[in-house]
Amino acid sequence: MEVELRYFGTVREAVGESTERRSVEAGTTVGSVLSDLEEEHSGLEGLLLEDGGVAGGVTVLRNGTHVTHFEGVETVLEGDDRLSITPPVTGG
Amino acid sequence: MANELPSVYGGEALRIHLGDGATETEAIDPGDARRFLGGNGFAAKQIAEHVPPEADPLGPENVLAMAVGPMNGTPFQSTSRGVLGFVSPMTNGFFDSTFGGTLPRAQKTTGFEVITLHGAAEELSYVYIDGDGAEIKPAGDLAGLDTYETCEAIREAEGEGYDTHVLAIGPAGENEVRFACSLHDSEIREGVAGRGGNGAVLGSKNVKAIAVSEGSFEPEPEGDLRGRAVQQMGRLMEDTEMLQEYGTAGLVNPINEMGKLGQRNMQTEQTDPENAEAVSGETLKTEYVTEDTTCANCAVKCGKHVTVESEGITDAKIPEFESLFGTATLQEVYEIERVIAANDLCDRLGMDTISWGVTVAFARECSEKGLLSEESPHLSFGDADGLVELAEKTAHREGVGDRIAEGSFRMAESLEAEAEKYLYGAKGLEFAAHSARGLKGMSIGYATGTRGGSHHDTRPTLQYDGNHDETTEGTPEFAARSQHFTALGDSLTQCRFVSEGGWGPRINENYTEAINLATGWDLSVEEVERIGERVYNLERLINVSRGVADREADTLPHRVMNEPISEGPAEGMYCPPEELESMLDEYYAARGWNDNGHPTTDTVERLDIEDVAETV
């Protein structure tokens, strides 16, 4: 199945693109996608995951809803899910 | 020691009587320093003591206080902000609006921790302040100049270049547009005291600008504050990377992704990703940002300048996130170059982009619904050119601009009752960008905020991390404690963005250690939080005395309580009346207020503010 990944801010700069569609196996979790991204992009190493969860301040949305309202990094993705990833943001 | 003033304090309050130019000083009481800390706390105390409850916000009895914090001028990062305290012509209650740049640091060196303007000048003037006191100088030739022009003209008149630090109003302030702001054009960045109508208060006093030259006072921390600041530096820079790269505009895309970014006067809360991208921090950085700018003693550099050749704009201040909400998404205007033009115009004319933008969006919906009788070609959603035209008309009170200049709540009073359904604000002040429907913490935070629709009473930051965004459980206490955090931060005059990122979004050991190192006190975390609580309760007492703070006033607009978000990830979210009432019960109980939202005698005694309470 495929999921859509959307990147913002400095995460986008590290990945080098704003969106991508990615093929993942059934049962893939949010955590495994974040782990893969950390491995694939040196600029993201250690930035997305921390102590077995999403790193502090990093916003990961599944179809617009914060993954803390699902199962956090254990949230299982479904086909055509949209995962939006934003680094820590303050201000506003 | 409570009976000695710590050496970070300059030691005096300066009162300026605008009518005759007389000045007087008063020593800062060491006990007051410990109770109210500075900045916000000092300003609130001045307003409580010197503004009668019945005073007209735009009359001479109102007072404008300009205050700095104890750590301004020390190594503690980003404490170089200043606070303007006054009774707001928008809310008729206490208001404090902060600004950055270099002027507050210059004020610190004068030794005057708080400067108050009383009465009104007979003719348009500017107030010049240095370490020796103050002088009222004529400014008739500055009438009609914009904020930047005024700052430049006064620098030229004083002949010291940027060593004269100037805060000015524009035509909007002179015309008493109720949400007029003031702008400080410093050598290293602009600072805008944006909200509450401080520019209108200055205009009503015939004060075109305040100019400050440095004095000789140097604050000396009692302990190794520099070492503690250095220790925090790594985390500060790491956690503010987005601010460094994009400024606050970096919030546009992620909050739109959540479906909590108002569109079309809050008829919806999400736009197509392409539209959000067009007005995002990412686009601004890629296409328009020319340089980073910063306040005194701040390495974060969240300020940016933008250049737009098609608009003839060179190195203008970047629109902040809140401004992009007010002037872009809420208008369904995604032509970023026109949005930048409208924002630059608001800065020059001296108008709060949030209140102006929300009021224009309100007027546009009223026009759409046939409630606004004025024929105006600029009142359609999506009209980017009209946006720019309306900025000029508002500042000069021309045509429909004269009604917009009163703010959305007063405009609604002049229309059919149906218009109230389209308001978006509380206590007379329009809400900022953080959704009153989509964030439960903002629902109760806005409803109870002493400033009305301000996002610097209860903060949204933790809510975007999934805390108290979708549940009411524990949310009233969260909102109250966040209000303590902001009141404390504004009393320290520390930049909120940097404090949340580098020191923590709650009152904690970091702040406590720093305050103790600066002052030599031995406060606990609980005692530090009590300072914030004390200041917030004092603000509330001022508002109670003015008849603008009770259970009836602690409310939310019709749309927030009756119209769930219609689509998107946050579909169905709102704050129905019974939910608000339940949260109010819990909030008042947590605060020690009675059922009508008034601080009880026990609470006033617990917070050690009986003496000030008697004056309001």
Image (cartoon, rainbow, N blue to C red):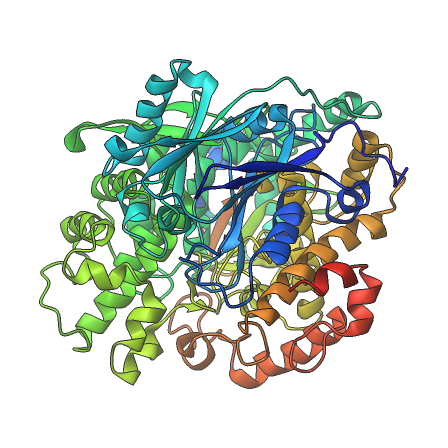
Q: Is residue B551 left or right of residue B612?
A: left
Residue B160 % position (x, y): 42, 13
Asked if residue B264 can be seen in this view, the reply is no
As drawn, B452 above or below B177: below
As drawn, B53 above or below B185: below
Residue in the image at 13% along x and 74% along y:
B373
Instruction: State the image quarter where residue B383 is shown.
Output: bottom left
Residue in the image at 50% along x and 66% along y:
B438
Which of A50 and A22 lies nearest the eye of the viewer? A50
Q: How many marks?
A: 0
Residue A70 % position (x, y): 62, 63
Residue in the image at 18% along x and 52% along y:
B393
Which of B74 and B6 lies nearest the eye of the viewer? B6
As drawn, B280 above or below B482: above
As drawn, B348 above or below B417: above
Farthest residue, direction top: B160
Residue B435 % position (x, y): 47, 63
Instruction: State the image quarter where residue B348 is shown.
Output: top left
Which of A51 and B614 lies nearest the eye of the viewer? B614
Residue in the image at 47% along x and 33% along y:
A15
Asked if residue B71 can be seen in this view, the reply is yes
Q: Is residue A45 left or right of residue A63?
A: right
Residue A48 % position (x, y): 62, 40
Q: Is residue B417 left or right of residue B381?
A: right
